[in-house]
Image (tube, grey):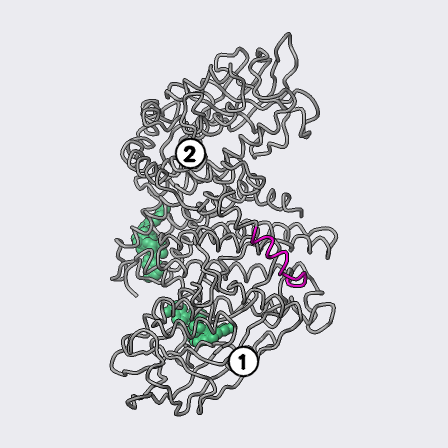
């Protein structure tokens, strides 16, 4: 498969680009909700519109009422979300939770997918149990109780957790904290007794919760996949999330870069446009190279995931790490090259820096993923 | 089976039958490759067999038309051949400036007669070419070149000096930029082809920091060049030169090479037993960049095929690819430790790690420096003002 978008994908990109630039624009969404200290950190009306556009069910199989497309297509939407810093539950709901639900029972799919496709439901995922992403370690316990389970533990960085109608929770049904086996995934409904959120606003104005599960009782049919055999479902869902976060990161990087290059062509100092100074030209050209490369490997990872290729997981880590580095460079150069104005709240470039920081931590930062690349490469 | 699937199966079988085992491991530097030409010698029987099999099949230049010595493969077929060769680590059968640089320029700008003659010679490895662009005063600022061709009716008389001419002392012919009009900077250069055996051509090797001397100072003293040995139009050689530079940059970038990260980590384990965590971390970050660049290379080649790539994109590939290659060799040296310092022992294969490390420093100079690549990106892709 060639590493560029085919005609259908290009059409989707045009549609998504136009939609997000109009409806998902920074002033209309991010600033709007931020300035109102919105408890969700995003607008439900936009989510509904995204459903009308068909975006919400991109990764949902046609048999379940979705579009049955792939990670390349989800990535197209995510890149536009990133470029416009559009706050939405797309990544957690339509990419991560949807890919977990794809491996769930008919019953669970029937319960949750229609709401997702219609833009009525929002899902979150609860994996991490600390300030850094370490999915190898899962301590939250799920004990057998009647014909179901009792969940106890604590989860962190549950993005949009408090707004979610359902949370995919990774818990341990057997074994020790660091065991690969013994992990099970659960679809935990929002109103489950014993579920408690401490919702906090993050630097990028998104809302994430510290989640406490205090003896949350679930029926056996809340299990996604196999009991004790959830590691594989979890890994695939995480890979989908990483590649999705990479795509959004590419959008953030491209958005910040475009703004900066534009500024270089307008701002005059020392009687010249600052874009005429070679010191800045070279840095901008280097940045361009890094962002292009990050974008290429993200598309590669999307295609490998869609093909179910053996090295998809490795490439997901390469993409997350490479985008992490490139987007971080884009926002740092962006603020610096804007000079004093880049430090002001009024100017959007700082918002890119904030979003990048949150995305960088989400599902593992560049260091984590580089380490994983080394491990998977055998050293 | 689809046509492409059967092509893959045939290719696999052909490679199995024709690529000797010794040609399935990487060459140890430039000297280990086969460069063809009038005075060519083979390093081994295997190298000869592999070259001849490829030559007869048109696989030295698989995508060129058959009438010019190629195999006439379609882009997807050529990609399959590349993939199948990479799968068994098959070496390139022929290293050649004719293939990488002059050939593409002739395909675009050459007359039918020139194509039939020169392309076939290149494809068959009969004539080895060198590139006469740089001059002592004209490196990055190439259009300032001074070598002058005086119009004598049916021929030019060329005088001047070139420098950094790779393999000038081993090459049979040169493709050369010559000023034919002193009044016009850009539109006063002609792209000429001539025999290095012509009277008045002399070369003097320059020793490199790697201890090798693959390039020369080249002197032209009243060299007679027949008037029909030019490509494109007279005084419009800059167009040909620029087009060729695009291909040269693409070649130097290693866009086609996907094996960059492999092996160093294993070497590090072997040398040190236990891994230095900081070095491991650097290596891991390198691997991220290398794997990402290899995806970029694939994307770039895919886009070139359908005309989607920005025309200045080879500059970006060259910049990123060569900076990465330098980093790779720094890591090879660090992972190799004192063993990598050995300069001529048998164990070190004649100091191949150290010599390769030093050789890669030229990657960001030859074919245009990294700084010049960044200038081009800034100007032509980002469209930044001035300069
Ligand atoms: C938090 C803060 C507090 C401040 N407090 C004060 C204060 O109390 N009093 C006061 O007077 N000022 C203050 N300043 C202003 C500060 O001194 C200016 O922001 C600074 O001098 C840069 O000028 P500028 O913002 O106009 O950026 P610009 O000059 O527009 O620069 C934009 C970008 O172009 C680059 N650039 C500009 N010229 C060149 C060149 N020739 N070559 C290469 N690159 C170039 C810059 O490095 C920068 O990256 C403050 C700024 C900040 C952020
Ligand atoms: C191994 C090797 C093989 C080569 N083979 C050939 C060959 O076969 N044929 C041939 O014709 N040439 C060949 N070259 C020459 C090569 O193309 C030149 O060396 C190259 O173009 C740089 O020119 P220069 O060496 O004159 O450096 P200079 O142009 O003098 O540059 C010196 C430094 O200044 C920087 N610089 C120059 N201009 C600018 C600018 N505008 N902005 C910012 N920085 C700038 C450069 O980046 C560099 O760092 C080869 C070179 C090497 C190293």
Residue visible at 27% across and 58% down in the picture = A273
Q: Is residue B383 left or right of residue B283?
A: left
| Numbered badge on residue B38 | 1
User: Label 1, label 2: how many angstroms apart (C-alpha)?
Assistant: 56 Å
Expressed as whole percent of the image width and height from the top left, the position of residue B332 reads 63, 60
Q: Would you say residue B260 is visible in this rendering?
A: no
Would residue B18 be counted in the magenta stretch?
Answer: yes
**Front-lying residue, A155 or B182:** B182
Give the residue at mark 2. Answer: A74
Residue visible at 64% across and 58% down in the picture = B17
Residue visible at 48% across and 78% down in the picture = B164
**Front-lying residue, B70 or A134:** B70
Q: Would you say residue B316 is visible in this rendering?
A: yes
Q: Residue furthest top?
A: A146
Seen in the picture, residue A150 relative to A84 is either above or below; the reply is above
Q: Dot 1 falls on which chain?
A: B
Range drawn in magenta: B10-23
Residue visible at 26% across and 57% down in the picture = A268
Numbered disc in front, either 1 or 2: 1
Would residue A224 be counted in the magenta stretch?
Answer: no
Q: Specify few, some or many for label 1: CA neighbours under 10 Å numbering under 14, 14-19, or 20 or more.
A: few
Q: Is residue A261 left or right of residue A4?
A: left
Expressed as whole percent of the image width and height from the top left, the position of residue B124 reads 51, 71
Expressed as whole percent of the image width and height from the top left, the position of residue B322 reads 50, 62
Please, what secondary structure does the residue beneath circle 2 have? helix
Seen in the picture, residue A141 relative to A201 is either above or below; the reply is above
Please, what secondary structure does the residue beneath circle 1 have? loop
């Amino acid at each position: 498969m060639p590493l560029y978008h085919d005609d259908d994908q290009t059409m989707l990109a045009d549609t998504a680009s136009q939609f997000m630039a109009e409806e998902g624009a920074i002033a209309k969404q991010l600033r709007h909700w931020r300035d109102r200290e919105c408890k969700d950190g995003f607008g439900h009306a936009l989510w509904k519109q995204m459903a009308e556009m068909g975006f919400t069910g991109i990764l949902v199989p046609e048999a379940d009422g979705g579009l049955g497309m792939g990670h390349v297509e989800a990535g197209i939407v995510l890149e536009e979300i990133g470029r416009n810093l559009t706050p939405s539950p797309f990544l957690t709901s339509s990419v991560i939770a949807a890919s977990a639900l794809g491996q769930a029972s008919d019953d669970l799919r029937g319960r949750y997918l229609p709401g997702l496709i219609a833009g009525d439901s929002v899902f979150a995922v609860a994996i991490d149990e600390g300030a850094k992403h370490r999915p190898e370690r899962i301590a939250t316990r799920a004990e057998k109780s009647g014909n179901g389970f009792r969940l106890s533990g604590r989860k962190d960085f549950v993005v949009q957790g408090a707004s979610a109608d359902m949370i995919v929770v990774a818990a341990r049904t057997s074994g020790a904290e660091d065991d690969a086996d013994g992990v099970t995934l659960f679809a935990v409904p929002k109103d489950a007794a014993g579920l408690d959120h401490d919702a906090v606003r993050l630097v990028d104005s998104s809302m994430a919760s510290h989640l406490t599960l205090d003896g949350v009782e679930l029926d056996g049919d809340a299990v996604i996949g196999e009991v004790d055999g959830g590691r594989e479902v979890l890994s695939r869902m995480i890979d989908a999330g990483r590649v999705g976060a990479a795509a959004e990161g590419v959008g953030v990087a491209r958005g910040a870069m475009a703004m900066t290059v534009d500024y270089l062509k307008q701002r005059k100092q020392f009687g010249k446009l600052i874009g005429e100074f070679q010191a800045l030209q070279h840095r901008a050209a280097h940045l361009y190279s890094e962002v292009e490369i990050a974008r290429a490997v993200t598309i590669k990872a999307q295609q490998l995931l869609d093909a179910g290729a053996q090295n998809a997981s490795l490439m997901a880590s390469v993409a997350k790490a490479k985008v992490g580095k490139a987007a971080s460079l884009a926002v740092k150069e962006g603020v610096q090259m804007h000079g004093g104005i880049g430090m002001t709240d009024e100017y959007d470039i700082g918002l890119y820096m904030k979003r990048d920081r949150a995305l960088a931590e989400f599902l593992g930062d560049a260091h984590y993923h580089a380490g994983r690349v080394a491990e998977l490469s055998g050293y | 089976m689809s046509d492409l699937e059967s092509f893959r199966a045939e290719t696999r079988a052909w490679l199995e039958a024709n690529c000797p085992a010794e040609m399935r491991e990487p060459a140890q530097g430039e000297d280990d490759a086969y460069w063809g030409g009038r005075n060519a010698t083979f390093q081994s029987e295997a190298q000869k067999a592999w070259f001849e099999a490829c030559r007869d099949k048109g696989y030295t230049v698989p995508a060129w038309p058959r009438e010019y010595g190629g195999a006439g493969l379609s882009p997807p077929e050529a990609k399959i051949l590349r993939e199948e060769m990479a799968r068994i680590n098959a070496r390139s059968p022929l290293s050649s400036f004719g293939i990488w640089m002059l050939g593409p320029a002739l395909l675009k700008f050459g007359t039918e007669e020139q194509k039939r003659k020169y392309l076939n010679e290149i494809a068959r490895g009969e004539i080895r070419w060198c590139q006469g662009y740089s001059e002592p005063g004209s490196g990055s600022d190439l259009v300032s070149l001074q070598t002058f061709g005086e119009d004598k009716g049916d021929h030019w008389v060329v005088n001047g000096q070139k420098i950094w001419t790779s393999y000038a002392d081993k090459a049979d012919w040169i493709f050369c930029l010559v000023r034919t009009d002193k009044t016009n900077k850009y539109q006063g250069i002609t792209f000429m082809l001539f025999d290095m055996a012509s009277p008045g051509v002399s070369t003097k090797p320059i020793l490199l920091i790697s201890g090798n001397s693959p390039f020369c100072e080249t002197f032209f003293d009243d060299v007679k060049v027949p008037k029909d040995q030019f490509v494109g139009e007279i005084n419009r050689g800059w167009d040909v030169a620029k087009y060729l530079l695009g291909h040269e940059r693409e070649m130097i970038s290693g866009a086609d090479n996907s094996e960059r990260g492999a092996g160093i980590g294993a070497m590090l384990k072997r040398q040190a037993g236990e891994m230095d965590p900081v070095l491991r971390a650097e290596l891991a970050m390198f691997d991220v960049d290398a794997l990402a660049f290899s995806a970029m290379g694939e994307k770039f080649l895919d886009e070139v095929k359908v005309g989607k790539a920005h025309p200045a994109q080879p500059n970006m590939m060259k910049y990123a690819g060569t900076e990465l290659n330098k980093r790779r060799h720094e890591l090879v040296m660090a992972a190799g430790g004192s063993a990598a310092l050995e300069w001529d022992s048998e164990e070190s294969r004649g100091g191949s790690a150290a010599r390769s490390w030093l050789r890669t420093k030229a990657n960001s100079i030859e074919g245009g420096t990294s700084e010049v690549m960044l200038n081009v990106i800034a100007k032509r892709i980002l469209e930044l003002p001035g300069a």
